[in-house]
Amino acid sequence: MEFHRELINRYPTILTIAGSDSGGAAGIQADLKTISALGAYGASAITALTAQNTLGVRATHSVPPAFLREQLEAVFEDITIDAVKIGMVNTVEAALVIADVLHRFKPRFVVFDPVMVSTSGSKLIREETVEVFWSELFPLINLITPNLDEAQILIEGKIDSLESMKMAASEMIRRGCKAVLLKGGHLIGPTLYDVYAQLGQDTLTLESDFIDSPNVHGTGCTLSSAIATWVAKGNSLTEAIIFAKEYISGAIEAGKDIKTGHGPGPLNHSYAPLPMQILKTSLL
């Protein structure tokens, strides 16, 4: 018996699992802007609602775990997902739901930006949630993208230099992460350093120029969703990281002189939008 494959057109599709930022600079809103700007299609599942603006977060409301599951299953059961980006996961229950759904549907690429610390330095999640990250989520993740504050929580140690960044990234790989992009943006200087470590590979140091801008709110969300988008469009992980970092630099530069509200504003996500890419795939 011969089967005929029907060719269909579709968009590279990224699912973002994150919190909602009512101010529009970070979270789900930044992710969907990034995905669209890079020429792909974005779906979403919201983990938490925040009441916030450029001046700060006023309130947070966690989405009930059962409803988070409904969102995730609704998307996975209908739409072909090429990559997943995870952002704010602030409860054990949410982490367990996400881990269970990822294990069931097995998306081919997942990047996790572990949002743990607020801009003011306050810890946003409990220790037991971090433990669930290590035991249940990280084994299912292709890349984690912590900043220095988040990495210090994950390794329970101080990170204050490029050398300690390399040691921290290696420690996270040793403890079970497949790949780590440790962001050094908080060590401000004329040159910024990120450390990229992969299981079984040499650790790489990635350099970029510091751009003096007050508008960098949502940078971590934007970077991780950009990486997911470039992977969904057919690039290797290393290529996706390089392209995503170039996009971030351009978006910061393009938005540095723009005023949005009375506090730190967003990047200019749409400074150089790409046309929607169309994938031709087969369907039995």
Image (tube, grey):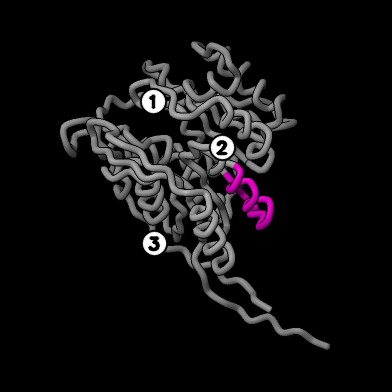
Residue 28 placement, left or right of 145:
left
Q: Say what amino acid the circle numbered 1 marks.
A: Asp
Within the magenta stretch, is there residue 98? yes
In this view, 59 is above or below 22: above
Magenta span: 96-110
Q: Say what amino acid the circle numbered 2 marks.
A: Val
Spot occupied by residue 260 in the image (x, y as percentages of width and height): 18, 39
Give the Cα separation between the discs numbered 2 and 3. Answer: 39 Å
Could you tell me which quadrant the N terminus lies in? bottom right
Within the magenta stretch, is there residue 78? no
Q: Residue at x 28, y 24 (%)?
A: 212
Residue 15 placement, left or right of 180:
left
The answer to whether any part of residue 150 appears in the image is yes
Residue linked to disc 2: 92
Residue linked to disc 3: 275
- Reading the chain from its start, which is encountered first: label 3 or label 1? 1
Mark 1 lies on a secondary structure that is strand
Spot occupied by residue 70 in the image (x, y as percentages of width and height): 52, 59
- Predominant SS of the magenta segment: helix
- Reading the chain from its start, which is encountered first: label 2 or label 3? 2
- Reading the chain from its start, which is encountered first: label 2 or label 1? 2
Mark 3 lies on a secondary structure that is loop
Q: Residue at x 39, y 52 (%)?
A: 32
In this view, 40 is above or below 219: below
Residue linked to disc 1: 209
